[in-house]
Image: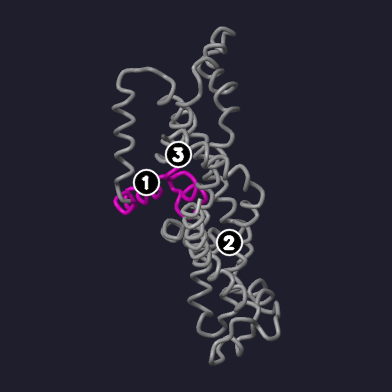
């Protein structure tokens, strides 16, 4: 009993420290965004604003050479479209690998997993040339479709689909259901938590992606928020730092909304997919 309490104590200490590493930078950015430029540059630096103001948020949203609201909408739209494309492609592929018996199933799945080891820099130029040949550069198609055949998504869903009892599908077969009917009416309804968890992971990863949108977009109308924040930082970090931090804080709002809405499903999905991967 004493050893258990001792272990729990150090576990809580460790988790508290890890949480502090994540939360403190966000609190610091929010605090600095509420200061004036003079207060931010004061020495010694202040942690808590003496006279909080929202002027930085008003300035960053009204700046003529910045399109923060448009870049925010672009990021949400591109991330949502990419998430829908990933689920649309990965779910049937995972079902085929998990439930269908055909020659070469395991070999094909092993080859698919090997592609995870390929660094994204290797496929960067071929993907860019492909987007150029399709005429998709500087369009949302270039932000949504490359990478939609997500290998991690196929692996995650395949592990979960494999754990669904065969009896459920056999009952559907007796009712005359084909492959599509079993996938649509049996497997998908039982996999909402896994699909939601994958969707959240994919959405957050794509929403925060900087490199690919920086390569394939070149007009302000198609830029995404991470690219816009680099423009904001390069233009104003030396002159008006609270405005840059206000833009960074605003960029976290959609992520917090997504987490607040799907928090329970995220936790359930991670737990279920973890059990399925054993």
**Does residue 24 appear in this view?**
yes
Any magenta on residue 127? yes
Measured from the top left, where is residue 8 in percent x and y?
A: 50, 55
Above or below, comparing residue 170 to residue 114 in the picture? above
Q: What stretch is highlighted in magenta?
A: 120-148
Front one among 153 and 243: 153
Q: Residues within 10 Å of mark 1 (few under 14, many from 20)?
A: some
Lower position in the chain sequence, tag 3 or tag 2: 2
Q: How many labels does the image show?
A: 3
Front one among 22 and 31: 22
Lower position in the chain sequence, tag 3 or tag 1: 1
Q: Residue furthest front?
A: 2
Measured from the top left, where is residue 181 in percent x and y?
A: 56, 18
Measured from the top left, where is residue 20 in percent x and y?
A: 52, 67
Q: Which of marks 3 and 1 is in front?
A: 3
Measured from the top left, where is residue 153 in percent x and y?
A: 45, 39
Above or below, comparing residue 126 to residue 219 in the picture? above
Q: Name the residue under label 2.
A: 71
Above or below, comparing residue 213 to residue 165 in the picture? below
Q: Mark 3 points at which residue?
A: 153
Which label sits on residue 130? 1
């Amino acid at each position: 009993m004493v050893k258990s309490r001792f272990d729990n104590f150090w576990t809580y200490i460790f988790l508290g420290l890890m949480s502090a590493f994540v939360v403190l930078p966000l609190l610091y950015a929010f605090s600095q965004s509420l200061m004036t430029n003079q207060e931010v540059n004061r020495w010694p630096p202040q942690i808590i604003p003496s006279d909080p103001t929202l002027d930085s948020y008003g300035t960053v949203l009204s700046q003529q050479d910045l399109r923060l609201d448009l870049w925010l909408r672009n990021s949400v739209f591109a991330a949502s479209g990419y998430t829908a494309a990933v689920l649309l492609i990965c779910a049937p592929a995972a079902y085929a690998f998990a439930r269908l018996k055909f020659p070469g199933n395991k070999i094909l799945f092993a080859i698919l997993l090997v592609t995870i080891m390929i660094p994204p820099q290797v496929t960067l130029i071929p993907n860019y040339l492909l987007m150029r040949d399709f005429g998709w550069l500087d369009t949302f198609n270039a932000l949504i479709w490359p990478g939609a055949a997500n290998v991690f998504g196929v692996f995650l869903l395949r592990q979960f689909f494999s754990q669904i009892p065969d009896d459920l599908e056999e009952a559907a077969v007796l009712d005359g259901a084909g492959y599509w009917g079993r996938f649509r009416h049996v497997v998908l309804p039982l996999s909402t938590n896994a699909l939601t968890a994958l969707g959240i992971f994919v959405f957050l990863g794509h929403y925060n992606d900087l490199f690919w949108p920086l390569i394939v977009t070149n007009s302000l109308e198609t830029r995404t928020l991470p690219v816009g924040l680099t423009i904001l930082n390069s233009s104003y970090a030396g002159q008006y730092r609270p405005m840059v931090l206000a833009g960074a804080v605003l960029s976290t709002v959609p992520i917090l909304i997504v987490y607040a809405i799907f928090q329970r499903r995220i936790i359930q999905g991670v737990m279920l997919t973890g059990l399925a991967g054993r």
